[in-house]
Amino acid sequence: VMGIVLNIRGFLDKAWSLAINEPKKVVHCFKVGLALSLVSVFYYMRPLYDGVGGNAMWAVMTVVVVFEYTVGSTLSKCVNRAIGTCLAGSLGIGVHWVASHAGDKFEPVILQASVFLLAAAATFSRFIPTIKARFDYGAMIFILTFSLVSVSGYRVDKLVELAHERISTIAIGTSICVFITMILCPVWAGTELHHLISNNLEKLADSLEAENFRVVGSKNVHEKDSSKRLQGYKCVLYSKAAEETMANFARWEPAHGKFSFRHPWKQYLKIGASMRSCAYCIETLHGGINSNSETPEFLKKPFNDACMRLGTSSSKVLKELSSMIKTMKNSTKLDILVDEMNSSVEGLQKALKTFPIHQHIPTPDPATAEVPSGTEEPSVTPTILLLMEIVQMATLTSLFVEIASRIEGIV
Amino acid sequence: VMGIVLNIRGFLDKAWSLAINEPKKVVHCFKVGLALSLVSVFYYMRPLYDGVGGNAMWAVMTVVVVFEYTVGSTLSKCVNRAIGTCLAGSLGIGVHWVASHAGDKFEPVILQASVFLLAAAATFSRFIPTIKARFDYGAMIFILTFSLVSVSGYRVDKLVELAHERISTIAIGTSICVFITMILCPVWAGTELHHLISNNLEKLADSLEAENFRVVGSKNVHEKDSSKRLQGYKCVLYSKAAEETMANFARWEPAHGKFSFRHPWKQYLKIGASMRSCAYCIETLHGGINSNSETPEFLKKPFNDACMRLGTSSSKVLKELSSMIKTMKNSTKLDILVDEMNSSVEGLQKALKTFPIHQHIPTPDPATAEVPSGTEEPSVTPTILLLMEIVQMATLTSLFVEIASRIEGIV
């Protein structure tokens, strides 16, 4: 019994911390409650009830199903539902008309066959990626409405009335949803995407910096803090799906805040992709360093400075990019930072060129006396690996910069 | 006009190739059609119609909403729907009873408040990750049913009847769904996950091999074929979400084929995770090689053999693992292959140890005369990078092997 109590307690704690960390989600919950209360008013006020008929149930259902966290997804579901219902309704009435003129014998056959074929076709269309991304819900509503209409009665005149009722109740439900999502503390998918990308850029910069510190081995950073920052890149690794759905929903949203209607949301996906390839590098680097971390001091020396410089300058570039995206302003500092980064890349390359032959071997100072023992030698490679990674990351970063400047042009 | 026609044509071509490549999905479409036709029979056969009442609509709706591609997801939706409906129905009736005893004045207030609060709470629960993964749909149905019940009438006796009707129609709908998904060409989420994992292992092995060939620079592989195989690891990178949902659904499935009811599906997720970290390595390697690919011959030489050996042996291990998972049998060959791989790792490490000092510098053969020109030197690093990557990958692979053998123990 105690175990269960503890379990429930842990669960409640988790829920509470979620509520504290993301007040927007709590607000969303109350928005849903409000929307449902508004809809149920239609039942309590008799005049309205008589107007809409017993089908007011559809309004409740629409609100429950359509109301989503972001404005974009709510809008897309509303549009999907409206289009799906209208299309299926008119098709269903058409099929009914044909069937009713075909005689008593063929009527059920025609209806059944049409349900079978159209349901199969619509289900198939849900597997096609382009449709799945945008009209998945619409296709489902299409199947639902069509089978309800084609099955629910035999006379067309009654059907038209039914269709009219359903459409009006759905209109009531969707308009309540749209009104509430857009007026009360709206959560725009576009804004969320924007924040996600700029936060991810910052996390990437942080973990790049922390990784750099760790590699170079300076100990004057707080351990806990750095390990937390180190993990930042993992968020970047796994955010692909979130970015895509949000960009998809953002397209449905009207102009809001600093975003116009046809904001180039696809550019965000591109930034996301280059961030991800950056994060892959960091992941590999991280793994490489974990596996053998004791590099002899004398080997690290020639690189440490160049490395540090490159790491910090590229993370600066990332941070500048992030703040550029946040404020949506072209920053003049960026060019300077990029130049700085490029020069440190060159410095590193120079260090690499001079290292294996001129510096390391021809000067057999006491420190290198250890080398022939053979146990320390392979640890050169993590440093070189690190360098290569950083060079690569720098290339990626400059790629970034290009993309970002392109975006800023469009914004 | 021509543009539109061409567009439609391209779309149809795509759909057709999808249908050809995945006949299972086409079969699924017909299954949906069949299920709907079966349900609509309830309308045409009058005796049944009278028994279930006008609420037969709910059966249609259940089929449309609940019928999913895999058995696991259909089952989970059915269970969710049943639990959500029952819970919300009984709660709704309880609230109604309380409200009806509270007097005419308070009745609507109590009902509205309960709808508001419960809807908000249920919506909030959908944000909690553990519930979202398993009971998202159930929470939605809970909100829907509760608001419908608490809103739809004032007398409890009529409500009980309504609840009875709804539950029986939902039972009809779900049983048709379950029957059809499980009897006609069932698509088990568990089997799909199993295939996905073993295919991904094979793809990983292929692209590791191809990458290896490309790095070492041997040209006797077909260009087109190898570039296609090279891209195999990308599937592995992006399959996280798919694996997780499938593992989630697989838990709902009863015993089928070679899988028992409590098959260790989580182990598949672990394999997936280590495959992904392997794929990150390949991705980094791929990027590193693309950026500077002309390594002078004399530098590559000492590593080429060791590299080749390691690459092929580790891809062999991966392939063996894949076939082991496919057949679900412990293979004795695996140990031999792992030993082989480990010995080639050692060989590579030896090559690394001997390389920078003993081999490369002290023998100033004619080939090294070029070095001081300084332009070729940094390209040592990609090879070393590659080696490190491969060593790392080998470590990962042995990790793999451990996990896999653990699984085989459980299977």
Image (spheres, coloured by chain):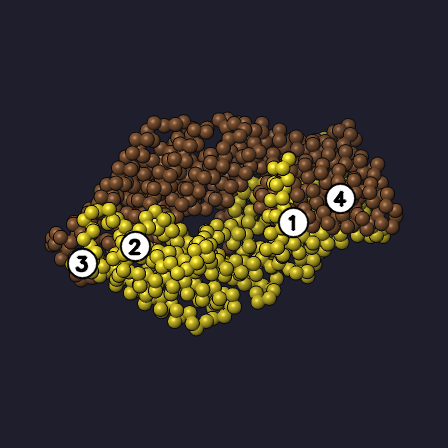
Chain colours: A brown, B yellow
Estimate the spatial distance between the alpha carbons at disc 2 and disc 4, rounded to whole Å.
Answer: 65 Å
Question: Is A157 drawn above or below residue A282 in the view shown?
Answer: above
Residue annotated with mark 1: A124
Residue annotated with mark 3: B365
Provide the chain ID for the residue under circle 3.
B
Give me the disc on residue A148.
Answer: 4
Same chain, labels 4 and 3: no
Give me the residue at 22% from left, 44% from top: A350
Q: Amino acid at mark 4?
A: Leu
Q: Position of residue B255 (x, y in %)?
A: 60, 64
User: Can residue B45 be seen at all in this image of the molecule?
Assistant: yes
Give me the residue at 25% from left, 57% from top: B298
Q: Position of residue A105 (x, y in %)?
A: 87, 50
Mark 4 surroundings within 10 Å by alpha-carbon count, few (fewer than 14), some (14 through 19), many (20 or more): many
Estimate the spatial distance between the alpha carbons at disc 2 and disc 3, rounded to whole Å.
Answer: 20 Å
Q: Amino acid at mark 1?
A: Phe
